[in-house]
Image: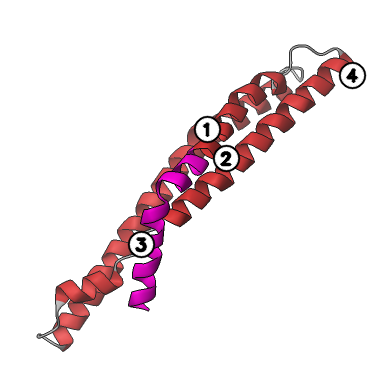
Amino acid sequence: MNLNLLPEMIVKIFFLIGVVALPVLIVWLNNRRKINEANQRTQIVLAAVEKNAETDVEDLLRQMAPQKTLLKEKLLTKLLWGSILTLLGLALTAFGCYLIAGRGDERNLFILLGPFIMPVGIAFLINYYVGRKILAKEIEAEQNQLLKQA
């Protein structure tokens, strides 16, 4: 075996693991988690019906259902991702410029990735600010409804 090809093979193996195997594993684990949660809810409902035949199944399922995310939480998630992606894009672009200036390495991946990631982050930030302005009344109504329930 040629030892000069070994680093190249290692890079290809890591690339395959990162691009193919890892996303498949993440999707599989997520689906398995959802199936397990559904099975657990089913077992709880069956046990409740066995113990008390007069149990209101719809009310029990409504209480067991996962809480839906609030509009404010969704907007804050967009703010978080917008900030992360914008700063990551800026950092990658700056690091790419540093490599070009320092070593004269004009074929670096950082200078290419930064300008593609940064606009996505900026789009998330714009989406947050526009959504906050447009959905202000709905967010307030949602908060009032939560206060009434508590």
Q: Residue at x 47, y 40 (%)?
A: 130
Task: Quickly name the residue at label 3.
Answer: 141
For residue 79: magenta? no
For disc 1, the marked residue is 123
Please tell me which residue is depicted at 76% across the width and 22% down the height of the picture.
Answer: 96
Q: Which kind of residue does numbered mark 2 sit on?
A: Gly
Instruction: Determine whether label 3 and label 1 are within 8 Å by CB.
Output: no
Percent coordinates x, y for residue 67 in the rendering: 36, 64
**SS at badge 2:** helix
* Residue topped by disc 4: 102
Q: How far apart are marks 3 and 1 (CA)?
A: 26 Å
Residue at 42% over, 51% down? 29
Q: Determine contact: label 1, label 2, CB under 8 Å.
A: yes
Name the mark on residue 3. Answer: none
Q: How many other residues sit within 10 Å of disc 4, few (<14), some (14-19) or many (≥20)?
A: few
* Labelled pair 4, 1 in contact (Cβ < 8 Å): no
Q: Is mark 1 on a helix, strand or loop?
A: helix
Q: Who's the residue at 34% across and 76% down the image? A: 148
Q: Is residue 140 magenta?
A: yes
**Residue farthest right in this picture:** 102
**Up/down of 134 relative to 110, above or below:** below
Gap between marks 2 and 3, in whole Å? Answer: 26 Å
Say left or right for 54 vs 6: left
Q: Residues within 10 Å of mark 2 (few under 14, many from 20)?
A: many
Residue marked by disc 2? 82
Q: In this view, does 147 lie above or below 97?
A: below
Pick the residue in front: 131 or 63.
Answer: 131
